[in-house]
Amino acid sequence: MPPRRRNPPAPHRNEAARLADQLQQAGYTKRDIARIINRDASLVSQFYTKNKGAAFVPALTQVLTAVHTAGISDITELASIAAPHTTRRTTASGTRARVRTKAVLITPTGTGTGRAGAQAIASGSARLRPLIAEAARQGLRLAFTVRLAKTGYVHVSGSRTDSPGIRRGVIQRADHTEERSYGSAATGGFSAADIARRVDAAGGDVTAAIHRWLVETGRIHADAHITHLEIRTWHPR
């Protein structure tokens, strides 16, 4: 007689994953949760796959309380609630673990470059915010390159209505995406301070700020999704 098949046990959920589940039931995505705790969205996925997230339990608990009892729903407000309760993980010896960070490098000539791929885009390209903030502090100019599906652009490549105006400002990819550059030293680019204000208004989400500018200026469709972003800075002439 063949053995009976038993239902597989439910996957184990650590406390961080359970709290993240409750936030998702309240309508937040993993990307939203990552923004609330000021981390990459991949870390939220690791609550489930690698049993991570213990350091964020106090913050997530406070956020859930704010959502359920105070009715707070704005991600920026929830992030400010989470921030004081986010602690760094400890090592086996009990000391606080080091966090790997990348320094914001802007040369004496004002040249600085930062790039964000698909994974960083998902969490708002947070790594680019310090570069923009420092460029604004130094009064630098700024340009950026975006990559998205060809169908996401309003104008055809090379259109003089769009910022590049010439095809050398456009790179077409085999996956049907296209890179377009906006601003340059030759045209004067954009004020880094203005872009920094836009990023602040978007709650620190660099991707959202750039996306909003592109939509407002009629360059991309509102439902277009940026897949890569590059920021470049320099001193004004």
Image (cartoon, rainbow, N blue to C red):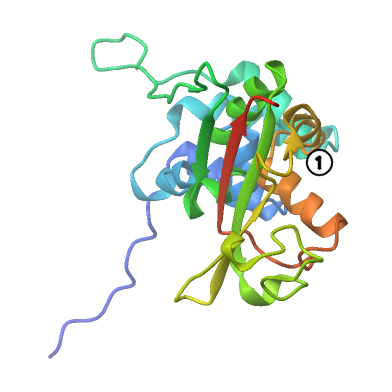
Residue visible at 48% across and 71% down? 173
Residue visible at 81% across and 32% down? 194
In this rendering, position of residue 80 left or right of residue 7: right
Q: Which residue is mark 1?
A: 73
**Crowding near the residue tagged with mark 1, few <14, some 14–19, many ≥20 C-alpha atoms within 10 Å:** some
Q: Give how far across and how far down residue 226 sits, in percent.
A: 62, 59
Q: Give how far across and how far down residue 181 sits, in percent.
A: 63, 54
Residue visible at 56% across and 59% down? 227
The answer to which image quadrant residue 190 occupies is: top right
Residue visible at 70% across and 46% down? 183
Q: Secondary structure at mark 1?
A: loop
Residue nearer the viewer, 78 or 182: 182
The answer to which image quadrant residue 129 occupies is: top right
72 w.r.t. 163: above or below:
above
Q: Give how far across and how far down residue 142 sits, in percent.
A: 67, 36
Looking at the rendering, in which quadrant would you find the C terminus?
A: top right
Residue nearer the viewer, 215 or 182: 182
In this rendering, position of residue 193 left or right of residue 115: right
138 w.r.t. 32: above or below:
above
Q: Please indicate, yes or no, whether residue 21 appears anywhere in the rendered image.
A: no
